[in-house]
Amino acid sequence: MPRRTDIHSVLIIGAGPIIIGQACEFDYSVTQACKALREEGYRIVLVNSNPATIMTDPEFADRTYIEPITPECVEKIIVREVEEMKRMGAKGKLVLLPTLGGQTALNTAMALTKRGTLEKYGVEMIGAKADAIERGEDRQIFKDLMLSIGLDVPISGTAHNLDEARAVAEKIGRLPLIIRPAYTLGGTGGGIAYNRDEFEVMAKRGIELSPVSEILVEESLLGWKEYEMEVMRDKADNCVIICSIENFDPMGVHTGDSITVAPIQTLTDKEYQIMRDASFAVIRAVGVETGGSNIQFGVSPDNGRMVIIEMNPRVSRSSALASKATGFPIAKIAAKLAVGYLLDEIKNDITRETPASFEPTIDYVVTKIPRFAFEKFPQADPTLNTQMKSVGEAMAIGRTFKESLQKCLRSLEIGRSGLGGDGKPWRIGADVYEDRGQPLPRELITQKLSSPNAERIFFIRHAMRAGFSVEEIFNLTKIDRWFLVQIKEIVDFEEELAAVKN
Amino acid sequence: MMNRDLLAKAKSLGFSDRQIAHLTGTTEDDIRSTRKKLGLVPSYRLVDTCAAEFEAYTPYYYSTYDTGDDEIKPSDTKKVMILGGGPNRIGQGIEFDYCCVHAAFALKEDGFETLMVNSNPETVSTDYDTSDKLFFEPLTLEDVLHIYEREKCWGAIAQFGGQTPLNLALALQKNGVNIIGTSPQSIEIAEDRKLFAAMLKKLNIPQPPNGLATNEAEALEAAQKLTYPVLVRPSFVLGGRAMQIVFSDAELRHYMRFAVEASPERPVLVDKFLEDATEVDVDCIADVGHFANPNEGTIVIGGMLEHIEFAGVHSGDAAMVLPPHTLSKSVIETIRTYTHAMARELKVIGLMNVQYAVKGDTVYVLEVNPRASRTVPFVSKAIGVPLAKLAAKVMAGKKLKELDFTEEIWTKYWAVKESVFPFNRFHGQDILLSPEMRSTGEVMGLDADLGIAYAKSQMAANSPLPLSGKVFISVSDAHKKQVAAVAKEYADLGFELISTSGTAKVLSDAGLKVQQIHKLAEGRPNAIDLLKNREIQLVINTPAGQSPRADEVKIRTTAVYTGTPIMTTLSGARAAALGIAALKKSGYAVKTVQEYH
């Protein structure tokens, strides 16, 4: 199918200022989309209030609005552009591409739909339609949809007030419980409640923070393994998996705050194929017409029960990572699919031979580690949970997990040259420990392993040096034993190297 | 010499030279030369989507010690390496990635082969389309040097990626890397206190009185000489880590004991803090170092940004206005003269950022950084000239005259920069602005009217100004004199005023109608209740002294979590009033940057 000729101009909404949960990955995706659609000869209208982005450089769009991304302001832009197109005698219409600028763009597009702006000015949404976005974003609709196609989801219920929240908690029947406010970014206002009191406080805050005063109360999957799949689909219903990602940190830590590894390391091919099939079923059921989506899965380490956690019907933070991890330019391809191309019609830039319908294969291991800034917020709680707190991330590539992990740790710019053994002392709260002195106190290690925090990866080494077995560490962290065994090899080899000195 | 097998295994497990050196009791340099003698260097593989099944055309590489099969395409083009900024963090974010991307675009245009080195997957710089070759690698001496040597680069740009590459620059230079742009000697003058003071003396440019301290006693002595308040900070930082304004001996002692580690090698800087001064950031571009006679070089100021908050707020957190809106012509001329004098003296090739504090008619220099600053993208968008791109071309040899950029641009519209903070993620954290940078991002408000530009910046920062309703005002004693005038502006705009006893008395004494409510300790309903009930549309709350009262912190954090706009400085409150007035008068319109320039 050729590109659409009924389109004259494409309005792309950026992501606004860099905030936690929405960083410069959307500059990357929107910049790619601008380039890809200009290549196709469309006139590009861009709105973004963030001047530090490449996309707002005047040469990336025909019309660049450095203006606030609010429904009211974008409506003014639409009015102006519709007039401008009339004046130009443009043949073809103005369309809105909302799936590349993160949650900000998606929310703004939904607001414009709801206030009737798009209909009034005849602006079509491309990439994903409003009803598909709603199916992906509204947790209850999404869950019902998943159950209806035979996929499993965590037991849960929505609540709009404290009484409803209590009733859901009753139905699930056991703590801890996860609280997720609807339509907030990076899980703002969400959390894990371990007792009744905490539950009431968090439920109340979540309802307050949700723009639609709604929370989802969910069965806890703490300690479950967490996976992500990056899927793309075209108008002819071709689907491909771009990248599979495994979270090193089990469920309970926001994926933006988790160490993640691509491709998936600890599933059998059979398990992977089940997940792949499920991913296609999800994107089809939700009805994301074209473009990329990110689907998150939880797998019980005890019995293998697989549940769908959520899906993002848009290009996400994980898409940027998946693009860099595989070399497959998700945003660019998503933009081309949105204007009518099919996956098998788009050439892969890298090989110039294979089409975009070839699933990427990778022969290396990619590790991503988040970067935190707790030193700037000393009064805040540094425990990691379902609300994202990291401010950035580093990625590294190696032929093995071990190589990529250590490369990534030295990329973090936190003064470490790897997992340990670099001579730099360890500062834990007010205490300082030598890098290769006495092992750290067991109580401290136990505490740091059992609740997720920015330093946990290093505490796995401290634990191994203090004589904790892989099994003990697994019981405290629920980090898959395969990863722990890999780390053990690094820690053991550190001793071999140290033996040279003696 | 170390056993080859052991070393090879260490490298394949990802150990860095520094780890190996420490573990085996030698130095990083030793390990590197040993490895090279043994031929143990990484090979570069392609990220190609197809596990090498098809030929790949996009040069996107990673290193590995699983050696053999090196896939780098050789080429004879003159190569420039651009060092990226690594992971985003507060103080080093997208602004620096923007500069690196521009460097790649600019040098590609000028016929160089560009090599990008970075480890941040979120960025445009790590798009394989941005540079001629992308190396997804850690920004460490070991990893960068390998690429530089393997690719036989002509030069490297370390001034665009923020502190990360700057920290590497000297070690790279020692190992034979040609760091292009302003000479490291000049950078040293700007960073070394004594050399810097000597330069300012020579140029007859004032700086705030200052001292150095390597321990607590010296710090107290310096503070006594300078008199409080003083600004204290460690010597080498970006993003204002551990920078603080200190008002008493007790606070200074606490700072020296708990906040920094001072030593003769890493002294703490103690500056007289200029209260109520106005700060100005200047970004300029220069090619002086290309000329034997510095007077022949060209220096162009890209933009002057006047801070809205008083001095003492980190420039990464402050709201700013381009061009300056309150400074006199003579002050602006002084700033221009000083900037030119320093760029000439430092023989700058590329970008330079200067921070000034203006008190009365005196202009003090606070800091000079001969490199890309955080405000470069903002200024570039505001004036419509890609400064980073021009700077990269200048660094690689071009002159500003050849690039046809010799005249300062003074815009006829206003560009307001506002910062965005992550306080809603860190419950309980006080939100007062300080010399320690905490914002994660920024927005720009553009308009022909200053009030509208400010109002747009607040809208864009997701904190839109209210047009009516109630304003809760509570200010410190120091601000009581000025508060009535500000409050009157709001009353005139139709807002109802609410205050607690102290401020309420000042306002009613000034003839303003004000509703008095309980302080938190006095009973309910109080400000917290009203905030939670969304009965307050705007909060003006300035800190009472150095250790903020628990009450205030509660009010400020409640404002954040209820999404109520809050101004913590009177100048911010004044700007907001200006914005509200403009919005009420005429509303706002939108315009493209292509139309502005």
Image (tube, helix red, strand yellow):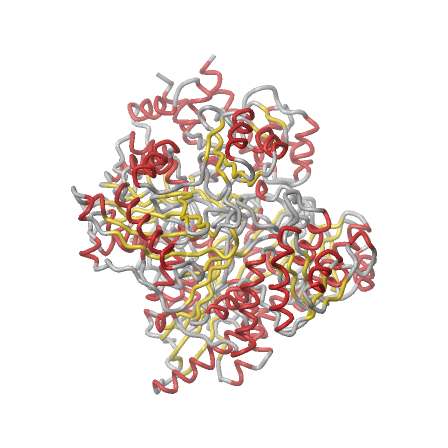
Q: Position of residue A499 (x, y in %)?
A: 48, 16
Q: Residue at x 33, y 28 (%)?
A: B40
- Which residue is more in the foreground, B422 or B294? B294
Q: Is residue B242 above or below residue A168?
A: above
Q: Residue B494, located in which quarter of the rendered image?
A: bottom right
Whole-percent x and y of residue B164?
41, 40
Residue B222 x/y as whole percent:
51, 30
User: How far across and down, in percent of the image, does residue B447 sit?
Assistant: 44, 70
Q: Nearer the viewer, residue B431 or B125?
A: B431
Taking the view exactly as shown, the residue that stands out farthest to the top is A502
Mark count: 0
Q: Nearer the viewer, residue B108 or B528?
A: B528
In screen coordinates, is A268 left or right of B322? right
Q: Is residue A260 left or right of residue A41?
A: right
The picture quadrant where one finds residue B180 is: top left
Residue B321, above or below A257: below
Q: Quadrant of residue B173?
A: top left
Residue A370 seen in the current view: no
State the residue at coordinates (29%, 34%): B185
Image quadrant holding the N terminus of chain A, namely: bottom left
Position of A250 relative to B30 (above/below)? below
Question: Does residue A157 appear in this view?
Answer: yes
